[in-house]
Amino acid sequence: MIQLVEGIAAPGFSGINQNGETISLAGFKGKKLILYFYPKDDTPGCTAEACNLNDNYEYWISKGYEVVGISPDSEASHQKFVKKYGLKFNLIADTSKEILEAYGVWGEKMNYGKTYMGVIRTTFVIDANGIIEKIFKKVDTKEHTNQIVKDLLIK
């Protein structure tokens, strides 16, 4: 499994969002990006994380950041999730797990003693030059915005 580190260029990616549009890292050149990877639409932790980032979306925009979520769910699943919670940002459907693997977030997990492959919830803060500024591997789903702001000292 790939292990990305802070200070290197973020892997390029291209994927389809909830509206069937192509979203790529290159499209954010000159903008800062909060790129978060999550396991599954409309589950408790993933919903808490998405809603926290959505509730603070105007704040992120005001600070020059865009927000994009990626999971292995389908475009149709993302459409329902976006509509149900009024999400204002793009969700990329990575059903092939290509982007997940490029970012090293598709890997072995354990739950109740059972091992399986899945998404390792991770957030990457990428600067305007495409460099990984910060990686959050222990995501506080309910307070993710505060977690990022506190760590990066964004005011």
Image: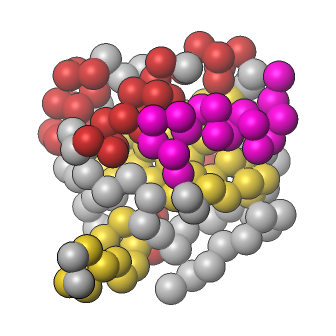
Would you say the magenta stretch is mainly helix, strand or loop? Answer: helix
Please tell me whether residue 151 belongs to the stretch shown in magenta: yes
User: Where is residue 40 drawn, in percent x and y?
Assistant: 26, 51
Q: Is residue 49 left or right of residue 125?
A: left
Can residue 16 be seen in this snapshot?
A: no
User: Where is residue 77 drawn, in percent x and y?
Assistant: 17, 41
Classify the position of the C terminus by image quarter. top right
Tell me the quarter of the picture where residue 34 sits.
top right
User: Where is residue 121 drawn, in percent x and y?
Assistant: 44, 59
In this rendering, the answer to whether 154 lies above or below 41 is: above
Where does the magenta region start and end? 139-155
Of the pair 81 and 121, the residue shown nearer to us: 121
Tell me the quarter of the picture where residue 148 sits.
top right
Residue drawn 33% across and 45% down?
Answer: 45
Q: Is residue 49 left or right of residue 3?
A: left
Residue drawn 33% across and 44% down?
Answer: 46
Residue drawn 62% across and 56% down?
Answer: 136
